[in-house]
Image (cartoon, grey):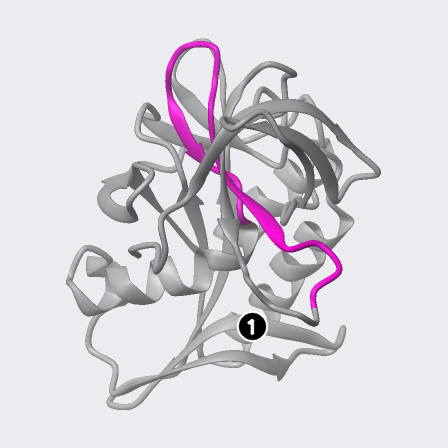
Amino acid sequence: MEFETPLLAGTLLQRYKRFLADVRLDDGSVITAHTPNTGSMLGCADAGSRVWLRDAASPTRKYRYAWELVENSAGVMIGINTGVVNRLVGEAIVNGVAAQLQGYDTLRQEVRYGSENSRIDLLLEGGRPACYVEIKNVTAVDGDGTAFFPDAVSARGSKHLRELMQVVAQGQRGVICFCVQRGDARAVRPADEIDPLYGHTLREALAAGVEAVAYRATVTPQAVTLDTTLPVVP
């Protein structure tokens, strides 16, 4: 995924009210940017971090700029925008990186499904039983280099796993896909220390036939591209 316009660089002053961040741009001006990430952004929202913003240039937006990338204290570039994961995984399917998700004729996004009124991120159809792909953006890594999800308690995440179990019980494929927007992760695991219910539900889902896959991205101010398959360690 290439950024359509050059990103603006600056320094993070603070993230607050969940969806807002104050940033000092390199020209010295201070702006408030939208933060497209609902998690805690553990290790990604430290004041003083180098950040990159996208200029939406839309007259209908309350906040003109959106926070896209951060460089953490170890110098690792991280994509924090959860809204781009469908596109990233879709591109990985097209270019063959997502080997486990090949062989379908069509790809649809945000399709309603399930008994808990959910929307599946990607629905792959044609030529075989349909494949329901739920995608999670992963930005946190532990001291051993293992990425983990979630970075805050996520009732929604457990709900999506329950929905995927129902899909599998109906004879379709259910896949939980971890989209790791940083280049230093070696594997992905559930964050039992943060949300034990999610970890329990993930293992229950895997036992029921839900598949877990993970892909790691190379992140630069020019583009974010999934290019490496990672193991999932439940």
Provide residue 110's location: percent of width, then percent of height.
Answer: 56, 77
Q: Is residue 227 left or right of residue 198?
A: left
**The N terminus - image quarter:** bottom left
Image quadrant where residue 28 sits? top right
Provide residue 127's location: percent of width, then percent of height.
Answer: 24, 89
Q: Is residue 138 left or right of residue 115?
A: left
Q: Is residue 198 left or right of residue 56?
A: right
- Helix, strand or loop for disc 1: strand
Provide residue 38's location: percent of width, then percent of height.
Answer: 70, 45
Q: Is residue 29 above or below residue 176?
A: above
- Which residue is labeled 1 in the image? 120
Going by the numbered disc 1, the residue's amino acid type is: Ile
As rendered, which of 14 and 87 lies closer to the eye? Answer: 14
Who's the residue at 16% across and 63% down the image? 95
Who's the residue at 37% across and 15% down the image? 75
Q: Is residue 117 above or below residue 54?
A: below
Q: Is residue 227 visible?
A: yes
Does the magenta-highlighted stretch encompass residue 127? no
- Residue with the most extreme left position: 96
As rendered, which of 27 and 31 lies closer to the eye? Answer: 27
Provide residue 163's location: percent of width, then percent of height.
Answer: 64, 67
Does the magenta-highlighted stretch encompass residue 65? yes
Who's the residue at 30% across and 41% down the image? 217
Q: Is residue 210 visible?
A: no
- Quick one: label 1, few (<14), some, or many (20+) residues within 10 Å? many
The magenta span reads 61-81
Who's the residue at 41% across and 22% down the image? 146
As rendered, which of 145 and 184 lies closer to the eye? Answer: 184
